[in-house]
Amino acid sequence: MASPPTSSGLRPRPAEHEPVPARRGLLSGRTHRGLVVATACLLAFGPAWRAWSQAPDLLENERAFAFAARALDAQTVEARFVVAPGYYLYRDKLHFSVGGAKKDPALPRGRMKHDEFFGESETYRDTIAVRLKLDRPTAERLPVTVAAESQGCADIGVCYPPQRQEVVVAMPRDGARPGPWVEAAPVKRKWFR
Amino acid sequence: MMAGRASWRAVALVALAAIVAAALGLYVGDARRSVPSLSSEALFALSLPDAAGQEQKLAQWRGKVLEVNFWATWCAPCREEMPQFVKTQAELGPRGLQFIGIAADDASKVKAFAQEIRLNYPALVGGFGAIDLSRTLGNTVMALPFTVVVDRAGNIVHTQLGPLAPAKLRSVLDRTL
């Protein structure tokens, strides 16, 4: 590593000693930038803040349990739920179908949860993914509808009604790489009615 | 040159202020519009079958302090708080309190659970439509349990998403009865 060059005579003034430019006009550059940032923040986070202020601490059903699916190969679809922190899904309330045909995939083990009335039940948190086999390979690029029914709750003590979510994935040709995840379209909020 | 820059800044400031004001106005206006105007009229217009299949008009309980609880047998937190409602109904019923359960569920499951906890107030069966109704009463995320307290004059005085803690329930009722 080179040592800093020694010098004599004039040296560049260190940046932190640069004089603050005199205030010109109505706003200094810094205030101006601050306002731009503040406005950008307001525009960016306003909708989020509004959504939050309406329903403190609680997500809507389809956001608490975000469903997505992708094609793995010509005969297999992978479906997943991303469960928001503080929420859980009941294992025995999960049902899947592909192209209208019910599937009975191997479900991963869940966590045991004790309910006063239900006794022990198995629940999922974080992300759970399952593989759904089609009865026969599907023609390339043919769209198939992957549907899931689920029911879950939030730890703070509310439960959501069973919901059905579906996505349409295009099947790849045999030997191709897995397709992209297709997220169930969240119900769009109308910010400006 | 300096003057030109200053006036440009002034224009920028005004423009920014306008954007901020417009954004705020839109959010606040939108928020105000999307808060449902809480009215108990939707409730009193309702007629639902009870667990025995008997049609019940909610208007028959007008003039009482109503505690309308939206629940379901598939909702563990709902089931957990209901024995406390049974106790409160027995205690405060004579003072004019009337609990009404509206279940987002099937009649057979409602009936079985009502017997299990010896429900002493009407258990109406609303199916999943009950959750839509609760939305018009302020349940924006449409989760259960959701409870609405209506005073004798028909004003909604409290809405609660999630379990009603006994102390909270007590203070709301003491205020309203």
Image (spheres, rainbow, N blue to C red):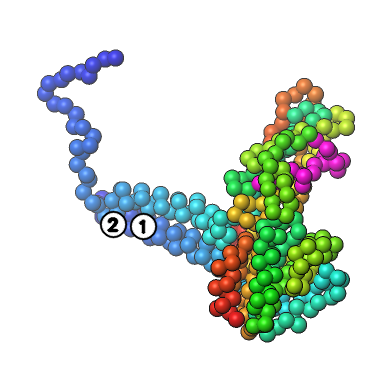
Q: For the residue marked with disc 1, what is the amino acid?
A: Leu
Local SS, label 2: loop
- Give the distance between the C-alpha atoms of the residues marked 1 and 2, in whole angstroms: 8 Å
Q: What range of the chain is rendered magenta?
A: A88-105
**Do discs 1 and 2 share a chain?**
no
Three-letter amino acid code of the residue under disc 2? Leu
Q: Could you say whether the residue bearing mark 1 is in a helix, strand or loop? A: helix
**Quarter of the image where the C terminus of chain B is located:** bottom right
Q: Percent position (x, y) of residue A29? A: 30, 48
- Residue underneath mark 1: B13
Per the image, the residue denoted by label 2 is A26
Would residue A38 be visible to someone looking at this image?
yes
Question: Residue at the location (64% across, 83% down)?
Answer: B95
The residue at the point 79 percent across, 30 percent down is: A76
Residue nearest the observer in this picture, B115 or A85: B115
Residue A4: percent from the left, percent from the top? 22, 19
